[in-house]
Every structure is written in C-alpha cells, then in structure tokens.
Amino acid sequence: MTDLPLLGAAIPLASLELYKDWIIADQRDLEIQDFVMVDVLNGDWEARVDRAKALLDGYAGRLGIHGPFWGFGLASQDPDIRAIVTRRMEQGLAVCEALGATQMVIHSPYSTWHYNNRDNLPDARQQVVDLTHATLDPVIARAESANVTMVLENIEDKDTDDRCLLAESFDSPAVRVSVDTGHAHYAHGSTGAPPVDYYITRAGEQLHHVHLQDADGFADRHWAVGKGTVNWHAIFAALAPLGDRPRLILELRDKGGILPSAAYLQELGLAR
C-alpha cells in the first residue's frame, strides 16, 4: 500500500483548516489557490501567507501555489500587456518566496486556434515561443534563485508536444510541464486531441505536476475522481515510470470531493 503514489490537493486557505490534518499526517503535496486573483496580489497577500504558515505548522511536504492567470495569456503580441503579465509572474514568485513554495502553476499559451493555424501563417509556431520568452525571460533568474519551478499547465492544448518543446526552450530548471487530466480529456473529447495518458507519456521527464480532476470530455468539470469518464488506470500506468517526481494534486471544484476521490483511487489500487 505504501508504495502507491501519494495524492495531494489544491485548496484555498478557506478550506485548508478542514484538510490540514490529512495533508500534514502524510506530508502530502499541497497547492494553495488564493494567489490567482489580482485583488489578492495587489492587496495584502502577506496576511494570507502568514495565515497559511500558521495553519501549516508541522508541514514539511512539497508546497506550491497556482499562479495568476485570469484575463491574460503568456504570448500576447502587445508589449504593454506582456509587461503586466511579467509583473503578475513576479508577484506570484514573491508569494512563493515568502511562503517557501517551490512550485507555481502557470497556464500554457497554446489554444485550439494556434493548433489549426500554426502552419497557416509565417513563423506562427516560433512566434508563440518568442512571445512567451519575452514574457517569462525577465523572471527566470528570480525563479531559479528562489528554487521555484514554474510548471506549464495544458489548457486548450491539442498537441501533446508544443508545451513540452516550449518548456525545453528555456533551458532552465525553473520551467517544466504540468498536465491537467480534465483539460486533456476536454481536448480529447471536444477537439480530437489524443487521450489523457498520451499527454503524460509525452511529457515524460519534464512532467513535474499533475492536476487530477474528472470530466466528461466536453467541458472543464473539475469533478471528483470517479464521477466522469477519465481513464484512471491508463493515467496511473503512464505515471508509474516517473516515480514521485510529479506532484499529484486533486484539483476539484467541490472540495468535499477530495477525500472521496482519494478513497476511490485507493480502492482501485492506484494511489493513496
């Protein structure tokens, strides 16, 4: 039983009180969700950091945050917008430094439109890479110094490799890859992308983070595990060669589904 992968969770501070004993007992991976909002980042985010530290007394597991993403992309053609996005990344890294977090989830710049037009316009493929570098290059050294890995999470990504090649292009330990099972299942069901386990297999050694959520292949459901049609046996078979490097984070809309999801995967003999 103890050789099964250990599950963690993505939780806002408002729910952490309910789950901190479960998290701390086995030093599970934890992702704090409060720092995605602009009003938090532009406000008194230090108070939330202090609250998290108080709640996590005795915690020695791997801690991360979901970085900001609302209202922007990493590959904007507008330099003024890119400057704002770079600032948001700096704010997220400041939170990581204060909190002691070593991972920050950021969103992939790739969309279904990119997939369909990447060979339709001159240099379209390279333009996404160049614009993302223009956004993230100014913060790479800070992330490296803080020992923070920014993991690129698939959102609309239809191609399993584009995001991985983008991460490789930084040639930095501060940029790696995340797979969100529900997002990949949406892309598979609604846009003809490969199945979820292919995303994991193709990410390979670059995979440092996984959002575990169930879905129906039509929308971004964030259902409890077992409530949708995601093939969990295939996913955990793909994860098996990677050991405990990827953080396996239950990211559910209803936080009440965290413990039932963990129990479901344990009953299947896939995780604990």
Image (cartoon, helix red, strand yellow):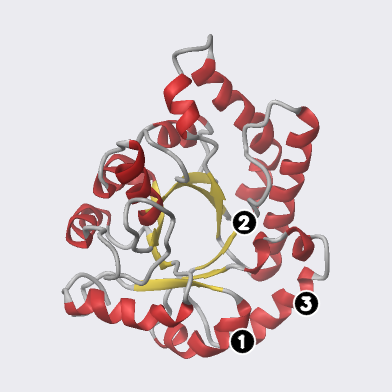
In space, the residues marked 3 and 1 are separated at their CA atoms by 12 Å
What residue is drawn where x is 67% and y is 31%? 76
Find residue 146 and report its horizontal and vertical position in percent: 64, 55
Q: Is residue 224 above or below residue 121?
A: below
| Mark 3 or 2, nearer chain start | 3
Find residue 173 and report its horizontal and vertical position in percent: 50, 44
**Which quadrant would residue 134 be assigned to in this image?**
top right
| Mark 1 or 2, nearer chain start | 1
| Secondary structure type for disc 1 | helix
Can you tell which mark lies on residue 47?
Answer: 3
| Secondary structure type for disc 3 | helix
- The quarter in which the N terminus is drawn is bottom left
Residue sitting nearer the eye, 114 or 68: 114
Find residue 85 and report its horizontal and vertical position in percent: 72, 42
Can you tell which mark lies on residue 55?
Answer: 1
What residue is drawn where x is 78% and y is 42%? 84
* Amino acid beneath label 2: Gly
Can residue 204 be seen here? The reply is no
Specify few, some or many for label 2: CA neighbours under 10 Å numbering under 14, 14-19, or 20 or more: many
In space, the residues marked 1 and 2 are separated at their CA atoms by 20 Å
Which residue sits furthest right? 43
Q: Left or right of 243: which side holds 144?
A: right
Specify few, some or many for label 1: CA neighbours under 10 Å numbering under 14, 14-19, or 20 or more: some
* Amino acid beneath label 3: Ala
* Amino acid beneath label 1: Leu
Residue under pointer 2: 67
What residue is drawn where x is 44% and y is 69%? 252
| Secondary structure type for disc 2 | loop
